[in-house]
Amino acid sequence: MLTVMARPRKFDEQQVLATVRERFWAGGYAGTSMDDIAAATGLGKGSLYGAFGGKQHLFHRVFDDYCNSVVDATAQQLRGDDDDENAYARLSAHVHAVAAATVADTAQRGCLLAKGTAELAEHDKTVADRAHTAIEALHALLKDDIAACQRNGDLDANADPGRLAALVLSVLRGIEALGKAGADEEMLTDIARTALAVLPRPAN
């Protein structure tokens, strides 16, 4: 008698990972079980383990993908093909876009980069290292754009672009944290305007 081998279940890997990300994003790492993930994806736990590894491996995968998406989106907003003339407009648009996105997050889920880092970085070196890499990349993108603003005469050329970038990055992370805590649109928009207003201008 011939034994018929069961074919492995086919699924869209990216769709599964997107669903897993949403589950972790909504419930956090500790609040999400493999049973939750299996129910959300419609896959058996055996299929999940076989394709992706355990819960920690799954989180690392979606966390890495999320970090990449945040950096890529920021790069699209801040890079301008060496166009110094529009560097300040790009910076302003990016700062206001973060505030607007935070206001639009009515579920107050916050940023998965911040959420995952706060929950796991102390005990999970992979998460800590990936978060650090993402923050460094965001800082570098802001630094490059601020340096372009300085070359174009929009910001004081004598200021340290790295320090200004760190200040802006801190403000943006703060906007996201305040939004998660329930800060309203007026406050978040005012913070964005103020952050731009305090950047040093060239002396007349």
Image (cartoon, rainbow, N blue to C red):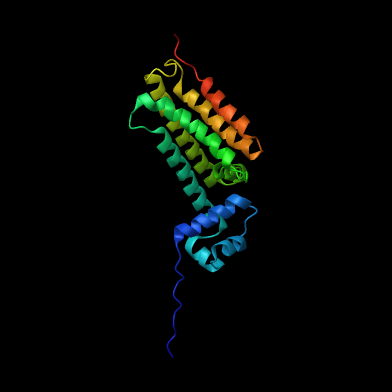
- What residue sits 45% from the left and 23% below the top? 161
The image shows residue 65 at horizontal and vertical percentages of 47, 49
Q: Quadrant of residue 194?
A: top right
- What residue sits 59% from the left and 64% below the top? 39
Q: In the image, is residue 132 above or below residue 165?
A: below
Q: Nearer the viewer, residue 171 or 107?
A: 107
Q: Is residue 29 visible?
A: no
Q: Residue furthest top?
A: 204
Instruction: Tell how many labels.
Output: 0
Q: In the image, is residue 95 above or below residue 27?
A: above
Q: Nearer the viewer, residue 121 or 103?
A: 103
Q: Is residue 80 visible?
A: yes
Q: In the image, is residue 101 above or below residue 198?
A: below
The image shows residue 132 at horizontal and vertical percentages of 51, 38
Q: Quadrant of residue 79?
A: top left
Q: Quadrant of residue 23?
A: bottom right
The image shows residue 55 at horizontal and vertical percentages of 56, 57
Compared across the picture, whether 1 is left or right of 169 comes to: left
The image shows residue 202 at horizontal and vertical percentages of 44, 13
Compared across the picture, whether 24 is left or right of 137 comes to: right
For the C terminus, which image quadrant? top left
- What residue sits 51% from the left and 60% below the top? 53
Q: Residue furthest bottom?
A: 1
Q: In the image, is residue 24 above or below residue 110?
A: below
For the N terminus, which image quadrant? bottom left
